[in-house]
Amino acid sequence: MKKAIIIPLLYAVSSICIFSQGSEHYFFKESNILKPFISEIRSTVIKGELAYLNKLDKNYYVSDYTSRPFIEVHLGADLPFYYLVNHEKNLKFSVSGYIGNMLLIDMFQEVTAPVINTDYFFGVQTSILKYVDYKHIKNVGLKLVPVFHESTHIGDEFSLHGYNDIPDFRRVNVSYEAWEIAAVINDPDTLRTNLLSAKVGFHRLWNVNKGYYTTDSLETKNDLAPPSQKNYEYYLQLNLQRTNGFLCSDRWMQVISVEANNRLRFSYDDNVEEKRTWNFNIYLGWKYLNKDSKRNMGFYLRYYNGIIPNGQFRNTGGYQYAAISIIYN
């Protein structure tokens, strides 16, 4: 496991030394390399979504929620540290941090409009991108996240009602540290042409004995959940952008983005076995391109199928989520 982290890091550091001659160095300047695709579940991409969903955790205290839309908001920011560009070697390298959160809220519930769940995360990312001269391959890249932390929190109304009125209710504290590595072909970077991009990644916990979550006897009425046993996940992402052809233009870029993520479906019961499951997140829409701006507004349809991706509800499968999404990235 340590070699999986150290070797790519040494490669990235040695690349700086090898290609530093004639390079341009920037501090606290944001780069565009190896940014998340919009289909990436844990992402700093800013989104606002109006969604219908088919189920929630069994402990949710209202039963008519499938008849009305929910609001999901994603917020995030990149924190650039260092950026290198070497035109002679067609190489780019960056080190940055990032923070983000994802909020699911039952906005149109008439009594309290309760918050269902909030996920918070932050990390440090090292990225290297090499441009190549092939017909269908524009560049290849590597992303390393040596430090990633996520913690999640269910809403107060949800938690208080569950603890007071549901005998077997448990609040589960999803909180963990992990590392991640990913390789990409045809990273979009600043390219605004027709481009099919692919990314494959692997994510694993640093503390495999702790697992993804813990429980506190004060929050579970002394009914503790067993720790998770499996400690990794992996994913494949495809991203198609088009500015030339049917239903697109140099102003309106069409984007189709898909993530297939194999992750752990949690189990908080000794009698229920943990399972690995494939989960699919799909976006289709158009982004308006302003030539003077790095970030632009887009309008999308989203469909997700798999385990509930929010907080402690990741023990529930068969979740379907369909939304209209406004995205700024």
Image (tube, rainbow, N blue to C red):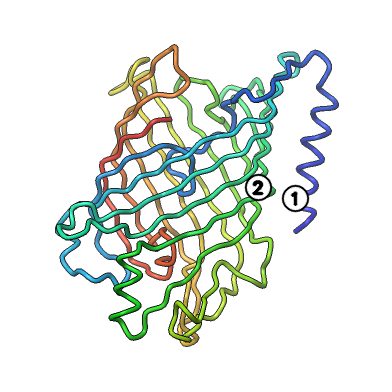
Q: Secondary structure at mark 1?
A: helix
Q: Label 1 crowding class (10 Å Cα cut-off): few <14, some 14-19, many 20+?
A: some
Cα gap from disc 1 to disc 2, whole angstroms: 8 Å
In the rendered view, tell whether residue 230 sits above or below residue 178: below
**Residue on which disc 2 sits:** 181
Left-right relation of 209 to 54: right
Give the total number of marks visible in the rendering.
2
139 and 35: which one is in front? 35
**Residue on which disc 1 sits:** 5
274 and 61: which one is in front? 61
Marks 1 and 2: CB-CB under 8 Å? Answer: yes
Three-letter amino acid code of the residue under disc 1: Ile
Q: Report the residue at 36% width, 34% height from top.
A: 327
Considering the image in quadrants, where does the N terminus appear? bottom right
271 and 255: which one is in front? 271
Q: Report the residue at 66% width, 50% height from top.
A: 147
Q: Position of residue 255 (x, y in %)?
A: 38, 31
Q: Position of residue 46 (x, y in %)?
A: 41, 37
Left-right relation of 178 to 65: right
133 and 146: which one is in front? 146
In the rendered view, tell whether residue 5 sits above or below residue 220: above
Q: Report the residue at 85% width, 27% height from top.
A: 17
Q: Secondary structure at mark 2?
A: strand
Q: Position of residue 170 (x, y in %)?
A: 41, 77
Considering the image in quadrants, where does the C terminus appear? top left
Which quadrant of the figure has residue 257? Answer: top left
Q: Report the residue at 68% width, 25% height from top.
A: 83
Q: Label 2 crowding class (10 Å Cα cut-off): few <14, some 14-19, many 20+?
A: many
Three-letter amino acid code of the residue under disc 2: Ile
Q: Position of residue 52 (x, y in %)?
A: 23, 53
